[in-house]
Amino acid sequence: MEKISITLPDGKALEAEAGAPLSDTIKSIGMGLFRDSIAAMWNGVQVDLSYQPAESGALKVITSKSPEAVEIIRHSTAHLMAQAVTELFPGTLLTIGPVIDNGFYYDFDSKHAFSPEDFEVIEKRMAVLAAQDIPVVRSEKPRLEAIQYFKEAAHAEPYKVELLEGWDSASVSFYTQGSFSDLCRGPHVPSTGKLKHFKLLSVAGAYWRGDVKRPMLQRVYATAFTSKEQLEAHLFQIEEAKRRDHRKLGRELDYFHFDENSPGMIFWHARGWGLYQNLMNYVRAKLSRNGYIEVRTPEVVDIGLFTKSGHVGNYSHNMFFTESENRKYVIKPMNCPCHIEVFNQGLKSFRDLPLRIAEFGKCHRNELAGTMHGLMRVRGFTQDDAHIFCAEDQIASEVAAFCKLLQEVYADFGFHDIVVKLSDRPPQRVGDDAVWDKAEEALRQACAAAGMTYELNPGEGAFYGPKLEFTLRDSLGREWQCGTIQVDFNLPRLLGAEYVGSDSGRHHPVMLHRAILGSLERFIGILIEHFAGDLPMWVNPQQVRILPVSEKYLDICREIEGKIRDAGFACEVDGRNEKIGFKIREGEKDKVPYLFIVGEKEAGSGQVSVRKRKDGDLGSFALDAILEKFRFEVSRKGRTDAAA
RNA sequence: GCCCAAAUAGCUCAGAGGUAGAGCACUUCCUUGGUAAGGAAGAGGUCUCGGGUUCAAUUCCCGAUUUGGGCUCCA
């Protein structure tokens, strides 16, 4: 038998017989390693443990502790789930079962409507199949033969046939465990006994191949991990996300509600509106300091303007319309055409550029009924929107300045992990390709100038121009796309925006559409979940609540409340006829950052007893001293460094 | 818009083809208190809406609306 040489990661080389499975080699290294092995890397490519190398090469064993392991485990668990489902619900057709972030899913076409009640039964069957430690065997078939196989009545799988017909490889691989066989590239675990820590999570409809016109399948979501601890940590994370759900906290904190009378629109309550205004005023001050002017334009606008701008042609499926006296109007879905109307008032010179026009403009978009989600996806929302009208040679510096401002703002909220994506031309768009070339190149250059790396998002640009998108990561590691800047050579031309250049000729300005928070509503939702409702003092609509120890001290509490409000802090008195312990409990439940307790001791000394949320009793302070502390806390915002 | 599910008191949720239930919240009274729940009494529901089946429907069936989980779309 011919010998080959197998190099291990530490540089050592083993001799093995050509064509012997890798599992034999791994056994020869150590039975402990073999027991813990899941798959292998052969010359940098993931393979099964059964892989039989014919020539010398490099081997790395993938064990349950390897970073690659969890993906393989999930993929194999998807097969295990499919096996359990087809055994329990005969006639169920298989489609695809990919690994996704934090888990996997499998799409089934079944007469049985899956519900969470089925999960336990399926999990139990999976556990039984895993306990049987059924070998998972790889085999190859010519593709055309595989198509024939899936056309036979005994194992008819029309979705698999469609998949296979779309490929062009000569041969395809199958993985078989017991009576169950699925088309798959692999690699997989060597036997079902390796699959121990899994959980079915939810079921929902999903179109075959994501196409609205194709059949609706049932997608079962599940997850799997290499250890019990990791699975439990993940399930805890899911619970934590539920606990932080901004819809739940928004109701508990009396921030807002949704109403059957206006689906997808927010009814802000006093506290939520206070938060909203804090946020808006903060951004307003930032913009003002960075050379923006603020305007206000109408929400109901003649349809003609939005037809000329291309919105009616490209965006009408998302727009609300109305009419009056035989005139048709749109409820504006974006502010840009209105800002061009502002720009167009009076003749502009190149000396007026860049002109940065900001608006907290309320927009309405007629989102599909099934897409609404709390504050995150609504039909009426307000962007921290602005349009920068500039000359072509100002794009790079304007984009760079915007990126800096955006990073400052995110840092104030404690977000530092920001991902940048560049979305280029979509299939449906306005403007010549030459103009798109220019716009996309300008963004690439601006990124380079700002020292930012970006990922490419092909074909995801707006219909009028390419964009940069800024995604932040919250405390649960979830990503939220918030900020954006979009280069637009098209709208100014379509709506006749011009300025007089230094050559006395007329030129169309370039327009940069940009937002930092995105939508104020959505950003509030993100903040609530990120902070689990414990908003930092500087944006919190509640800052101080004064609790009289008994009703005797109500008057002095009112006096202190007035002083705190004069100092610019939100303050209220809980004057209810309750014991102090009860009012403290309520204050904590309402997540008020500071509770002041005032009784006989304080009434005499002119001090307040301070209780800080999460930290508890801080002791007594003179009012001025504690207000000074507040000023510091508010001024440093989300920054953790000492300099503020 | 599509698939599946849900809708009972302000909130969280039980419930059964035959007069509607709990806890918390709310109101009133007692209590005037020191760092996460003092006590008593009381009020509160067209069981989302519209049809149908039935002697009888909040409960079963059909439709609508809204909400939830996804898909598609997206700030």
Image (spheres, coloured by chain):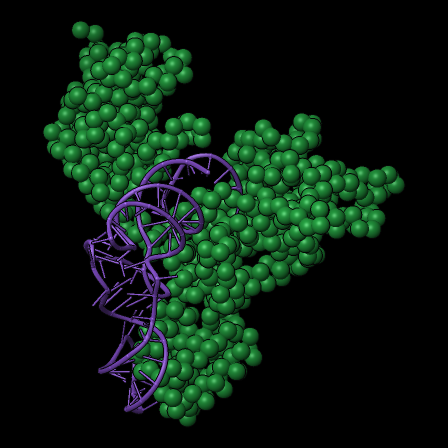
Chain colours: A green, B purple
Residue A13 vs residue A537, the one in the foreground: A537
Q: Residue furthest top?
A: A1
Q: Residue at x 60, y 30 (%)?
A: A428
On the image, the x and y values in percent for residue B22 come to: 22, 68
Displayed quadrant of residue A576:
bottom left
Taking the image as drawn, is residue A491 in sight?
no
Residue A608 drawn above or below residue A193: below
On the image, the x and y values in percent for residue B20 come to: 23, 65
Q: Residue at x 53, y 61 (%)?
A: A276
Taking the image as drawn, is residue A501 in sight?
yes
Numbered label tally? 0
On the image, the x and y values in percent for residue A409 come to: 55, 55
Residue B40 drawn above or below residue A113: below
On the image, the x and y values in percent for residue A272 come to: 49, 64
Quadrant (top left/top right/bottom left/bottom right) for the N terminus of chain A: top left
Query: On the picture, is A313 further left or further right than A98?
Result: right
Q: Residue furthest left?
A: A132
Query: On the picture, is B30 further left or further right than A558?
Result: left
Q: Residue at x 41, y 70 (%)?
A: A592
Query: On the picture, is A41 further left or further right than A366?
Result: left
Residue A9 drawn above or below residue A638: above
Residue A126 vs residue A303, the one in the foreground: A303
Residue A625 vs residue A3, the one in the foreground: A625
Q: Residue furthest right?
A: A504
Q: Residue at x 55, y 31 (%)?
A: A459
Displayed quadrant of residue A62:
top left
Residue A497 vs residue A379, the one in the foreground: A379
